[in-house]
Amino acid sequence: MKKLAVLLSMSLAACATDVRRFPLADPLWIDEDQNHVPEKPSDYYSGLMADGADMMAFYPLSRMWTFPLAKEAANANALDEVPNSSWFTNRIGLHPVTPEEAALGACNGQPKLDPADGKWIVSGAKPNGANPGFFIKAPNGQRYLLKFDGPQQPPRATSADVIGSKLYWTAGFFTPCNQVVYFPETIFAIDPEATAENEFGEKQPITDADIDKTLSKAFRLKDGRLRASASQFVPGRPIGPFTYQGTRGDDPNDIIPHEDRRELRGSYVFAAWINHFDSREQNTLDVWSKDGEREFIRHYIIDWGDSFGSRWPHDQISRRLGLSYYFDFQHVFLDLITFGLIPRAWNRSEVSAEEIFGYYNVEQFDPVDYRPGYPNPAFDARQPRDLMWAIRVLARFTPEHLRAIIAQGKLPDPRQERELYRVLRGRQLKLIESVVTKYSPLTNFKLVRRKADSKRQSLCFEDIALQYGVVSSTVATYKMRFMGGEAADEELGWLQFRPDSDHPHRSCAALPIGHRRPADLVDASAPDDDPKRYGIMRIFVHQTRSVLPTSETRVHMYDLGRERGFKIVGIEHPTNATRPDVY
Amino acid sequence: MRLPWCALLGAIGILCGVAPAYGQTATASVATSSTAAPPPPAVALKVTRAAPPVVAKNTDSMTLDELVEGKDLTGTPKLPPREPVLPPVSAKPGEDRPLPNYDGRDPEGTNAAQALIWLPRVVFFPVHLVFEYLVRFPLVQGLTKIEEHYVIKRVERIFTWRDGKSGVYPTFLADFGLRPAVGLTTFHRDLFVRGNTFNAAIGTWGPKWLRISATNETLVLDEDTGRVELSGFFDTRPDQPFYGVGSATSKEDEVRFQWSRWQVGGRFLASLGGLSRLQFGTAFRHVDFLDDPIDPPYDPSRMSAPGFDAGSYEILESEARLKIDTRDPDTEFKGGTGYLLELFGTFAFDPSSTSRNYVRWGAETAVFYDFTERGHVLALRLSTEIVEETGGTEVPFTELASLGGLESMRGFLPRRFVGDSAVFGTLSYRYPVWSMIDAEVFSSVGNVFDERLQGFALKRLYLNSGIGLRTNLDRDVALTFMFAVGSNRFDGLPTRPDLPRAERDFRIESYRIVFGLTQGF
């Protein structure tokens, strides 16, 4: 009892700790997770049935007895962003990416796969997956996996594989270079050594008949050319998928449980966006990569062929994809005990006007409760801050980006392109609205000196909610409180304003906002990281006329004096906006 | 126009449009604070517009990045490299890298929830170990090996042939109150000629329980409009229940008997469009009642079982059946609304004893309403069956009208009610609970009566209700689970007729659980 009391008192004491200051340092942008690994990690095999059963039943059943508490992502830096690593590279989220760059995606700088260059040598065949495929070696020296559409919904699958890869690459993930290719039937030559596993895992030589059988189901143009998606082999040696939970025991660089990685948690948003319900570990790839003298694992996401409304032979399953797991204990139980009277989105779904997109729509899309085929531990571990991060990235995709990327899918009918754009844009808006009306919509904080000869800084930011029009700019109000002092509990100034109607999504506030600034609290000779130089700008966002704020963002700064100005060292997006005592 | 609003709102503490947003054409005055808390009421200050900045294009729609490009951004954090770069080495080759301090701050303190949660964690740690290492690990590893080595496909290859047109699969059915059954079913589509299907099944549970059946179905008219079906079966079972004949039988009178029977027959089915059809058929059936002692045994002194004492009988019967069903034949999702009318008539006689002959006739009607058009179907079904002796020799009790089993009055075992006529009504509601499973809740009332429903009265009916789950992938073969209960008769009879009326209350008489693979042939 005594020990428990001590523990409790320690805990309560911890609750009452002062503000956690960020150090006066640049944010961590490079995660040093590409150290040389002397021994190649072993290959990992993942099966659909085993992984599905594990994720739907065994993993949660075992984990529930550890009483897991929700926790924040482990790899968010001081700006609440994700550092570059062997998993992720910040692209559109933090850098300008042109639509042309986004359309190229991972193909930027890669040789083009041109059927005019010569024969494609078939070296193997894809043993599993919904659509058949070949491994080929092209005259440009590169190897590709060619995948075909099959008889269902052509050419959705090949388009989806290409468009999905571009969207994920632009967001920052490692992806292969996927492209749609058209080619004559006669382009193939079979490597005499080429073998492929049949459906029983037995290796057999590839014959002309095998190729003819596959091509007979492929999408074909009127001029006789065939269509496929060509996925270029990524550099390195594939060693199997990565898991969405735990770490890889034989990779010393892999020390953060994957379900705690923000980029994997946040990929929920991108999977929901394109209905990548097949976002399971089998559609990821660890590659034993070499860079200079170092060998390490790089982590890729692959295969988006089931996105954008894949339909299965059993219509009841197709309707549920993205809305319910393949077997969803919660939905089954609730439907059973309520006699199926709960209105379900899958009962309202209609096949798209462009039939190739099946049930991929905006109307029935639930951005808050998107469900892939079976539970994804990283998706399930997502916290509001992970969603906010992903939404900040998602919001940077402009209509021009989407149109440029969709064009890479080479859909044969412009109506299909228009419909895909409409749904993608609509779901993007729904995703954004679901987050920025509940949590902080503010992003892209900058300190700007507006005139060359002025030392006065403005704190500028963008508001995603206003940018996307999900909140009225005539209602939105910002209330800023600048806190400083030893415990950062002394109000140094305040400001309230509404966004400018000319450009409501952009706002700036000249600093300091009060008569005092943190540097005034210390002697000029105080070190730069003196705690009293520390200030926190609490920005309360009001999206309704309520006196209670909708959300809050805290910008942590050091005040280095009037000459050198403020320096942003950290950004927090609390998930529960609390009013200051005096408001 | 904004200024008056600002003044007004400023007076109530909210200021608008006065923050000097970057790129804004005005250097607006701000409503800002004093250093003392609480802040004074905000006052809308005079707004002065400065000269517009020189910009090359309309800044309204520009992003902040575009707008501040080239500006002095001192104090703004640096951005990460745009392309992947090889980071500095953080650990010796082969050693775990140190965990970076990603946000640079001291670790967050432990809160009460984080401290207290260790209590259940420690207590239930053994449970976690069991689930992790005795359940999860072996099962997931086993499934992985099965997939990795294509075990399912290899097994499927053993049990199917002719490109999947022929095959064999196991079956099982547990019907609590009866003996369970395990078996094998073999199917052969397009056997010998296109459109010819042959199915056969064997089921057993010990030497006294055996069922062998076979059906061959051949398309004889174009577009599946006419089929000829030849079928036969042999079964012998030691667990058949019997409660007596008539509307006032009691659960307490249950006896069991053994029988052995075989049947061959054929029928022609003509499609009338959709699910409607007309069929004619004939069958020959031989039945033996076995006299092995079964508990509880049949006791002629307690009840009458017509035909049982003769030991065996044979029946040759001919049947005509008309079924009008307006529902959509699509088994999957749509068109649950419609009505059903089914009429049938059978003439049967015993070739070895021509005085034993009878007619069986009846009707069934039902209405179905799918109120979502997504498989939420409310159905009301009424059915009656009448058996009339026409030759002077009594009809064996196993040929009389009966209720109970999996088709009618499902809360009771088969042949719970046996009589000259039977009637029952069922209100059911079927709804999808999963993409491949439908649930059904049902409630039926019914009983058997004397000839032509003589003696029918509502108070003489029995009630049964239940819930069932059924896979919806195949019309003929389904994995089924059902739980149902059956009541005593509404009027309290015949249970304890010696008791005063007030004590003969309505009560549950029967529980029934069925689980397994049910087949339509």
Image (cartoon, coloured by chain):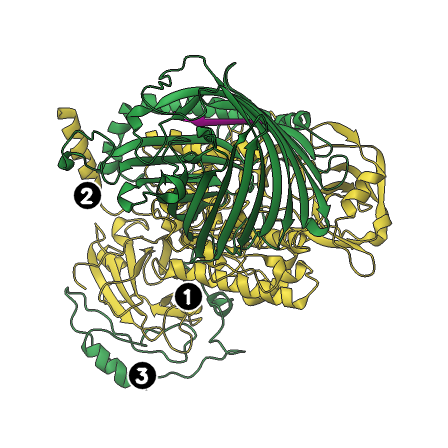
Specify whether disc 3 shares its chain with disc 2: no
Rendered yellow, the chain in question is A
Residue at left offset 29%, top offset 45%? B457
Q: Main secondary structure of the magenta part?
A: strand
Q: Residue A128 colored magenta?
A: no
Q: Are marks 1 and 3 in contact (CB under 8 Å)?
A: no
Q: Chain of mark 1?
A: A
Horizontal and vertical percent position of residue B58: 50, 78
**Of B193 and B246, which appears nearest the observer?**
B246
Element marked by disc 3:
helix
Specify whether disc 2 shares its chain with disc 1: yes
Q: Which mark is residue A448?
A: 1
Specify whether disc 1 shares its chain with disc 3: no
**Of A216 and A421, which appears nearest the observer?**
A216
Residue at left offset 83%, top offset 53%? A184
Q: Chain of mark 3?
A: B
For disc 1, the neighbor class at 10 Å (few under 14, some 14 to 19, many from 20) is: many
Amino acid at dot 2:
Ala
Q: Which residue is mark 2?
A: A16
A100 versus B162 height, above or below: below
Q: Residue B175 colored magenta?
A: yes
Task: For the C terminus of chain B, give its image quadrant.
Answer: top right
Horizontal and vertical percent position of residue B368: 45, 54
**Is A461 situated left or right of A159 in this image?**
left
Q: Colour of chain B?
A: green
Q: Nearer the viewer, mark 2 or mark 1?
A: 2
Count of all numbered marks drawn on residues in the image: 3
Q: Chain of mark 2?
A: A
Task: For the N terminus of chain B, give its image quadrant.
Answer: bottom left
Q: Which residue is mark 3?
A: B2
Residue B94 makes an appearance in the image: no
Mark 2 vs 1, N-terminal side = 2
